[in-house]
Image (spheres, rainbow, N blue to C red):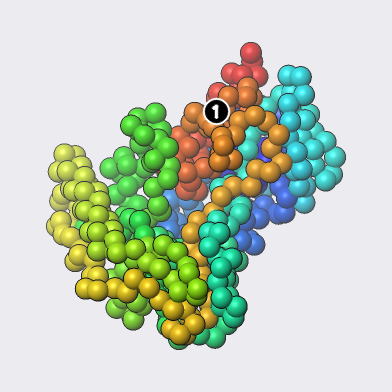
Amino acid sequence: MVGAGHAGLAMSRCLAVRGIDHVVLERGEVANSWRTERWDSLRLLTPNWQSRLPGFGYEGDDPDGFRDMTQTVAFLQRYAEVISAPVETRTTVTSIRRDDEDYLVTTDRGEWRARSVVLASGACNLANVPKVADALPDGIASVHSFDYRNPDQLPAGGVLVVGASATGTQLGYEIHKSGRPVTLAVGEHIRVPRTYRGRDLMWWMDNAGVHDERWDEMDDINRARRVPSFQLTGTDDGSTLDLNAVTDIGVALVGRFAGLVDGKAQFSGSLLNQCALSDLKMNRLLNSFDEWAAEVGADADVEPSHRLDSTRVPEKPPLTLKLAEAGIGTVLWCTGYRPDLSWLEVDVLDRKGRICHEGGVTSSPGLYLMGMQFLRRRKSALIDGAADDADDLSEHLAAYLDG
């Protein structure tokens, strides 16, 4: 196993239950990415009750709260101890290749030979920074959310945040509240309420079966895997952090970031359409919740149906912005992440460097994948999604080992 985050630990537990000898190789400590690659104020977007791993769950007295990173690390560290996961920490994998019928796994602490390998190193190892970032004028800092920790690390001046999914809205809100003016470039995004009809959004996703939708039921699974994350964050009071919330505090909205020429940022004119489409998708999702509640007789257990106000969009958002003249000191790229598979020497990658797989099973016998977006179910990338995926794949892996 490569990676001792929630996905790797869940798979470790399932392999142990099946009596399969294994080792978990981790470049840092357990939950290394949660420890070292997240901003200070981040909280899980799923409530505490939803942190369910094989043989383990939430043990505290705040099931509807949202863990911060320190609490998340402690939760996963506790899980590793409870299941006695065979983790080799501070062990960096430098290559994996086929060697006859086995895999040869080379690390900075020696080599392992195994009949099967599970890649659970995550989807967010590297920052996805647009090439146009190289064209930023001197004196304007370029920071990706991967490296962002808090507003104090940013230089003086305004901030252009590029990307308005979960990360962009959270960081735009936080940075503006710190006293820096923020402009948010909005592209494709999915707006949702934190709570609906008196229940957390994740309660609805869970109970209505949306989270359990499978990869082999999708008309276009590749498109489904590229859908942006919800515009959602964990909050103490159950409030919704969306575009209306950020504009209420003074964040300026512009369209999708389209380019940069001579220090002038260019934005598309699609802001109104993007927001209207996002509202449409949100209301379709809420309609499906209403239909489920009516079908199973749950209407009496929740509040009446309602809808959020439409996203408020400026009538004529600017299509260009001279960064220096506008006082922009930083461009913060909230443009996503990608996995680091530079050490994988097995022919399972497409031309874009992505692993080809069917529900986590690759074309190379005995090589599996865990923890990716919509791997086997819509919830696969969540902590809560690892259990079912690990159970399925450990069964497949056991059958492979049995011939």
Residue positioned 37% across, 38% down in the render: 212
Pinpoint residue 112: horizontal percent, then vertical percent: 80, 33
Circle 1 Cα neighbour tier, 10 Å, few/some/many (<14 / 14–19 / ≥20) = many
**Foreground of the two, 273 or 245:** 273
Pinpoint residue 131: horizontal percent, then vertical percent: 55, 59
Residue reaching furthest to the right: 110
Q: Is mark 1 on a helix, strand or loop?
A: strand
User: Taking the image as drawn, is residue 222 in sight?
Assistant: yes
**Foreground of the two, 103 or 320:** 320
Q: Is residue 12 above or below residue 261?
A: above
Residue reaching furthest to the front: 262
User: Taking the image as drawn, is residue 238 in sight?
Assistant: no
Q: How many labels does the image show?
A: 1
Is 98 left, or right, of 305 in this rendering?
A: right
Q: Quadrant of the N terminus?
A: top right
Residue positioned 55% across, 71% down in the render: 136
Pinpoint residue 257: horizontal percent, then vertical percent: 41, 64
**Residue 241 falls in which quadrant of the image?**
bottom left
Q: In this view, does 394 lie above or below 175?
A: above
Residue reaching furthest to the top: 403
Residue positioned 83% across, 46% down in the render: 108
Residue positioned 56% across, 37% down in the render: 351
Pinpoint residue 139: horizontal percent, then vertical percent: 59, 80
Is 217 left, or right, of 262 in this rendering?
A: left
Query: In the image, what residue type sits under mark 1?
Result: Val
**Residue at the disc numbered 1:** 361
**Foreground of the two, 161 or 291:** 161
Q: In which quarter of the image is the C terminus?
A: top right
